Amino acid sequence: MWNLTLRAKEISGCGIAGIIHKKGELIPGEMILKAICCQYERGNGLGAGFAAYGIYPDLAEYYALHVMAQNRQALEKVEEFLQKNTFLNFQEPIPTKRVKTIKNPPLFKRYFVKPKLEEEEAEFCNLTAEDDRMVQLVMEINEKIEGAYVISSGKNMGVFKGVGFPDEIAEFFRIDEYKAFIWTAHNRFPTNTPGWWGGAHPFTILDWSIVHNGEISSYGTNRRYLELFGYKCTLLTDTEVVAYILDLLIRKHGLPLELACKAMAPPFWIEIDEMPEEERELYTALRILYGGAVLNGPFAILFAYNGGLVGLNDRVKLRPLVAASKGDLYFMASEEAAIRAICPDPEKIWAPKAGEPVIIEMEEGVIPNQKSYLKPRPVEVREDALRIGYIPPSLFSGK
Amino acid sequence: MGTPQFASFYPDFYIERLWEKCIKCRRCVKECSYGAHIWDEKKKTLLEDHTKCVGCHRCEAMCPTKAIIIRRHPSEFREHALWTPWFIKNIYKQADQGGVLLTSTGCALPFKNYFDHLVLDACQVTNPPIDPLREPMELRTYIGPKPEALEIEEVNGKFRLKKKLPPLIKLEVPIMFAAMSYGAISLHVHQGLARAARDLGTLYNTGEGGLHASLYEYGSNTIVQCASGRFGLHVDYLKAGVAIEIKIGQGAKPGIGGHLPGEKVTEEISKTRMIPVGSDALSPAPHHDIYSIEDLRGLIYALKEATEYKKLVFVKIAAVHNVAAIASGIVRAGADAVVIDGLKGGTGAAPTMFRDYIGIPIELAISAVDKRLREEGIRHRTSIIASGGIRSSADVVKAIALGADAVYIGTAALIAVGCTMCQRCYTGKCPWGIATNNPELIKRLPPEVAYEKIYNLVKAWAHEIKEMLGAMGINSIESLKGNRDKLRAVGLTKEEMEILEVKHAGE
C-alpha cells in the first residue's frame, strides 16, 4: 500500500492524432501514421503508440489481451494465470518486424479470452460482470506478475506502443498491415523518466483507450479518489487515471459521455451560477460529487471506445487540439497540419473550446458489439448500508 | 505579615518608562485593566507594578508619546536546563494558591510544527502556472454528505438530476471561524465574525454560549454549537444556523469541558446562556447523554429530528491518539462532517497541563483521518474540517493537501482584531476588548473594526491561496484536496513522512 502511494507520476509533452469513420468503414494504417509523423517535433523518440479498433472482426466476441513481457518466464506466468482465470480461444505472437533503431524490444503476444465467472455471476451472464472481472484480471496481472503488462484488453481492438519515434514503432508493429474504423496515435516527449515501453500511450482499460498530451496536476487527488473504487494505478503515469475515471464515470456510474467529460473538465462556478435552474442543479451536483475526478492542469486527450472517438481539452485550454471532418471521416489532432497532411480539404475544421468535448459516435449498428454512451444509464452503486446523509423520504424535498 | 506570595516576587514582564518622553497624561493608567500602571496623586508621578503586567502591550500601543516599552523582566535565575523559570514560577503559583494552573490560547510548547516542515510545489516548463489575476481560480467548497453517484435522466434532450442532492453547505472560501462563545469573546467580536462570514460567503461558529438575539439575522452563515453544558440551547437556537456542531472535545483541552469564569457572566451573557449572572459556566467533561458511539448516533438524530433534517450535524473532536478510528465511527454514526481540532487549538481558558500536553498535532491527525476514511471507502462521502494552529494561508493549503475539506481559524481571527497573545483571556480583563465582557473594555473594539479586520484577513488569505493554487497549475481547490503530491517534507523522519504520506524534498 505504502509503495503504491509513493509512486511518482511522470511528466510529458506530446503530439496526438485520431481518426474515425462514422459508418465503420476501415481506414488504412498509413493514414494515421502520416498524421502522427507530421507532428514529429512534438516527440523526442522516447515513446509512440497506436490504438486500432476493428482489427479482430473474427474474434470480436473475445477480449483481446495485448501483453508485453520482459522475458519468456513472465509470459509463461501470464499464460498460467490466463489458463486458470479465463477461457482462452486463441493466442499468437503479435507480428513485429526488426527495426534497426529499436534495440532489445520486449516480447509481445496477444490472447483472445473470456473471463471465467463465479457460478452465480455466470448464470446472469451479463456483460457488466464480464467487464468487471476483466478489469480485475488486468489489474492483477499488471500488479502481480513482474515484467508483464497488459497493454490493451478490449474487444476487437488493440494497442501497439513502445519506445521510439512513431515511424519506428509503426514499422516495428507493421501498422501498415492493419485497417481500423477508429485510429488514435501518440508521439511522446517525456521529460522526467527514461523511455519505458509500458509508459508509452495509448493507455487502456477494456476498450477504452486514451492518448494524452499534458500533465495532470490533480493526479494525487485523482489517484486517491480512484483507489476508493478499487482502481490501482500501477503504470507510473498520470494518463492511466484518465482511463479509470472514464471507466468509473461512464461504465459504472452510467453518466452520459457529455457529462463525464464535464466532470473531468467542469464549467467554472461563475458559469454554473448563470445557468437556468435545472441545469445549475445538475452541474453543481456534478462538481460536488466528482471533484475527485476533475482533471486539473493542461491537457488535450483523445479517447476511443468501440463506437466512438472523443476529444477533450482542459477547462482553460492550455494544450492544443484541432478537429475536422470530411464526409463520414472525422479527424482530431494536436495540430491542424497533421489533419491537412491526410485530408487537405476538410469540409469543416475547428478548434474546440476549452472543456467542450468533441464527441463523434458511429452510426447505429455498423460494427459488432457497438457501444454508445450518449444517454444516461442506470446507476450501479454499492449498497449504502451507512445511510450517509440519510433523510426520511417523507421529509426529503429533492424528488 | 501574612504568608509570602512567592510568585509575586518574580514578575514576567518589566514596564520600562522613558521619562524623557512621558508627559504624564495617565493614558496608561486608564488603558491597563490589570492595574499595572498607577498614578501617585501625592507625588504627581506614575508608578509601575510589574507583577501585574501580563504583557498585552496595550499601554505601549496607546501611549501618545511612545514612552513605554514592555520587556521580559531582566531579572534572571541561575541557569538550569531542567528547572527553567517557567517551572519554578509555576510551582510558586501553585504553592501560593493550591490551584490548577490556568492559561489561554493553544499549546505553547515548541513541539515540532509539521506545517513548517512541508514545502509546496510549483509549475516549471512542463505545465504552465496559472495567473489568478487573469484566469478564474476557484475556492468554492461544499461541506456535507455526498451520495456515491448521480442519477441522471434525459428529458426533452436535456440531462437533469433524477434525484436532488440532500442539503449541503456552500463555502466561497474554505476557511471558517472556529467556535468561540459569546462570553469567552465579546459581543462585538461575534458581530464582526458574523458579518465577515456573511460577506466572505463562509460560516462562523457560535461556540457553546448560545446566540445573542442580535445575531439571528446571520443565520445562513452560522454554525450553532451543542456542547456538554447545553448553555443557551433551545429549538430556535438549533434552527437558527445552517449546521449544528456537537462539541465532544477541543484541541486545547481534550477530555474536559468548557469553562467560563463567573467574572465574565454579565447580564447579557446570562440571558443568552440561560444561567445566573456571575455564576461559573462549567461544562461537564462528557455529554451526559453520550457515553458511547451509539449514544452519539442518538444525539445526532435527535438534533436532526428537532430540525426536520434541514440542518447538517457536525461532530467536533480533539485530535487524540486514536483519532482516525474515532472519526470513522463518527461518520458511521451519521455525522455530516467531522471536525478535528489539533494540539495547537486555542481556548479562552484551559488548565495549562491540558493545553500543553494533551492531544496530537493537527497535521498528523488530518492525514491519519483522511487515510482511514479512504481505506474504508467513505472519504468522498463526507467532509473533514481541520483546526488548531492554522496561522497563514500556506497552512490552509497544506491542511487541504493533507486531506481536509476546509479549516477553522480561531486564534488567527482574534489576532486580526488586535490580540497580542498574552494568554490571559480567562481573566476577563482583556485590555484589547476581545476576550472580555466588561462594558468599558468592549468599547475598545467596535463591531465595525472587528468586521473589517477579520474580513481583510480572510480576503488576503483567499488571494494568497489562489496564487499558490495557480503556481501549482490547478485552478480549483478540489484538485488540491488530499493531493500529497503537492507537498514535500524537509527534515522529517521516515515514520512522520509515512503518516503524512509525503515524500522528502528531492525525491
Image (spheres, coloured by chain):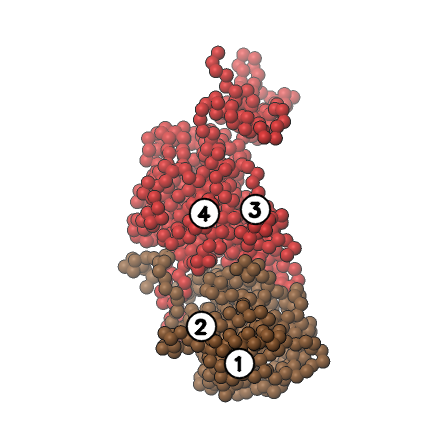
Chain colours: A brown, B red
Q: Where is B114 relative to B5, above or below?
A: below
The answer to whether the residues at label 3 and label 4 have Cβ atoms under 8 Å apart is no
The answer to whether the residues at label 4 and label 2 have Cβ atoms under 8 Å apart is no
Left or right of B306? Residue A189 is: right
Please tell me in which quadrant of the rendered image residue A238 appears.
bottom right
| Badge 4: chain ID | B
Q: Which residue has dot 1 on it?
A: A111
Q: Where is A186 relative to B175, above or below?
A: below
Q: Earlier in the sequence, mark 3 or mark 4?
A: 3
Q: Secondary structure at mark 2?
A: helix
Q: Which residue has dot 2 on it?
A: A132
What type is the residue that disc 1 sits on?
Tyr
Residue B421 seen = yes
**Whole-Å distance between the Cαs marked 4 and 2?**
36 Å
Q: Which residue has dot 3 on it?
A: B114
Determine the residue positioned at 33% across, 33% down: B275
Q: Earlier in the sequence, mark 2 or mark 1?
A: 1
| A159, B453: nearer the viewer | A159
Q: Position of residue B494 (x, y in %)?
A: 59, 51
